[in-house]
Image: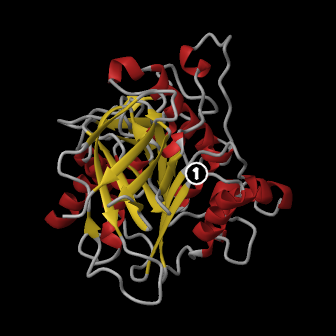
């Protein structure tokens, strides 16, 4: 029958065969992570060679890049909605999206996926100049089981081998930050994702010590990179306790982190476009990356000072220091009793900054002002110097 012949041709076209260079129908050409052949490869087919697709911004590139690990329970890869589409969204705010096609079951088990993710990070650092990337702004992102892989590379890393013959292997594989999207985190708790554990570990899925070492909330230390996480409350495929556990471990070890839980959305929402709440996670990520300083190559400095209003210390307010450098972070602080202090790690970008001071009133059991008021004059600027405390006294007047 004609339709059966057409279906057969279609299936053949989709599946393909042989050991030739991988061909992707959409997006940039894939790059093999080991051009001479991947370690531990059990064959020469396309799925035996891990690759990356590098989606570069067409404009306003910041130098930041994120290795994206699609989900799929370590058995498949959700390459569209948890890979290429996400890379394009990152491009919109100047970030290079690098989609990783890592090896997985049934042919590959742990530690092969981890090695592929580590190699991708090393590759970007080794080729940072050619790719116009900042080697200290390389992050990792993962969805579902890809989130487990991203959290694994964030807690199991090394500084590279300085004497390696391969220059890529000399690079550190520690990501500078991680983005974990409805991630699998635990392989041992009652909310663990058993399917991911089975696919990742095979006949070692009953090894309690191995399960614990890959339940990555238990592996967080003070050296774990900062993280942005999002999950949905109604996710029943991978329960929100996974992300909660990792976040709490970051808090315990004083690692900077931001965590968003959206009420609605099942497992596997990807960018969640059209869902009124969860669709906001990517814009929140862009803000977090800018606030954290991952979108610019400048320096930040401590800022301290006093603020008076009509000759009296400003009782309760806020101050914002906004850099003129594109993508640079703004610095912000509460003002209490006329004083403010911003530490260097979240300080102002050096150079000229625009200053906005808001009066929030007093801390009393009655309203003292009609509403929050901007009390700084328009175009008020300060000059922030590197490696200094940058102490300022602002004497402001009411209108």
Mark 1 neighbour class, 10 Å CA radius: few under 14, some 14 to 19, many 20 or more:
many
* Residue ranking furthest to the front: 311
Q: Nearer the viewer, residue 275 or 214?
A: 275
Query: How was this image coloured?
Result: secondary structure
Q: Nearer the viewer, residue 125 or 293?
A: 293
Residue 273 as seen in the image, left or right of residue 42 = left
Q: Identify the element where label 1 is drawn.
A: helix
Question: Can you say which quadrant of the picture contains the N terminus?
Answer: bottom left
Residue 188 visible in the picture:
yes
* Residue ranking furthest to the left: 2
Horizontal and vertical percent position of residue 126: 48, 20
Taking the spot 66% from the left edge, 14% from the top edge, the residue there is 162
Query: Residue 264, relative to residue 315: is it above or below?
Result: below
Q: Which residue is mark 1?
A: 149
Question: Can you say which quadrant of the picture contains the C terminus?
Answer: bottom left
Residue 203 location, quadrant: bottom right
Horizontal and vertical percent position of residue 47: 47, 41
Query: Residue 94, relative to residue 234: is it above or below?
Result: above
Query: Residue 328, relative to residue 351: is it above or below?
Result: below
Residue 181 visible in the picture:
no
Residue 394 as seen in the image, left or right of residue 379 = right
Q: Nearer the viewer, residue 21 or 3?
A: 21
Residue 253 location, quadrant: bottom right
Taking the spot 39% from the left edge, 61% from the top edge, the residue there is 318
Query: Residue 241, relative to residue 167: is it above or below?
Result: below
Horizontal and vertical percent position of residue 380: 23, 45
Residue 93 as seen in the image, left or right of residue 206 = left
Horizontal and vertical percent position of residue 12: 29, 50
Taking the spot 57% from the left edge, 76% from the top edge, the residue there is 239
Residue 119 location, quadrant: top right
């Amino acid at each position: 029958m004609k339709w059966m012949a057409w279906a057969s041709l279609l299936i053949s076209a989709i599946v393909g065969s042989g050991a030739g260079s991988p061909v992707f129908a959409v997006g940039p050409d894939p790059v093999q992570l080991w051009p001479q052949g991947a370690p531990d490869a059990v064959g020469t087919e396309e799925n035996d060679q891990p690759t990356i697709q590098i989606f570069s911004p067409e404009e306003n590139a910041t130098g930041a890049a994120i290795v994206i690990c699609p989900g799929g329970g370590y058995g498949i890869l959700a390459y569209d909605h948890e890979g290429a589409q996400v890379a394009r969204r990152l491009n919109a705010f100047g970030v290079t999206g690098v989609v990783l096609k890592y090896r997985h079951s049934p042919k590959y088990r742990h530690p092969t996926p981890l090695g592929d993710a580590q190699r991708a990070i090393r590759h970007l650092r080794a080729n940072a100049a050619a790719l116009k990337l900042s080697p200290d702004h390389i992050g990792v992102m993962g969805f579902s089981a890809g989130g487990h892989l991203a959290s694994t590379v964030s807690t199991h890393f090394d500084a590279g081998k300085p004497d390696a013959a391969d220059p890529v292997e000399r690079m550190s594989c520690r990501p500078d930050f991680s983005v974990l999207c409805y991630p699998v985190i635990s392989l041992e708790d009652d909310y663990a994702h058993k399917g991911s554990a089975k696919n990742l570990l095979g006949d070692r899925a009953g090894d309690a010590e191995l399960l614990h070492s890959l339940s990555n909330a238990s592996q967080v230390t003070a050296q774990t990179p900062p993280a942005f996480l999002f999950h949905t409350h109604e996710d029943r495929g991978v329960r929100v306790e996974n992300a909660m556990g990792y976040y709490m471990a970051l808090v315990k070890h004083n690692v900077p982190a931001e965590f968003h839980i959206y009420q609605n959305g099942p497992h596997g929402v990807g960018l969640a476009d059209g869902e009124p709440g969860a669709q906001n996670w990517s814009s929140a990520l862009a803000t977090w990356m800018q606030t954290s300083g991952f979108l610019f190559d400048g320096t930040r400095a401590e800022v301290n000072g006093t603020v008076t209003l009509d000759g009296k210390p400003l009782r309760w307010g806020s101050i914002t220091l906004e850099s003129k450098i594109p993508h640079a972070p703004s610095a912000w602080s509460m003002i209490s009793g006329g004083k403010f202090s911003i530490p260097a790690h979240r300080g102002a970008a050096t150079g000229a900054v625009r200053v906005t001071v808001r009066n929030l009133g007093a801390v009393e059991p009655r309203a003292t002002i009609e509403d929050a008021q901007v009390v700084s004059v328009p175009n008020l600027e300060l000059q922030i110097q590197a490696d200094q405390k940058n102490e300022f006294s602002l004497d402001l007047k009411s209108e």
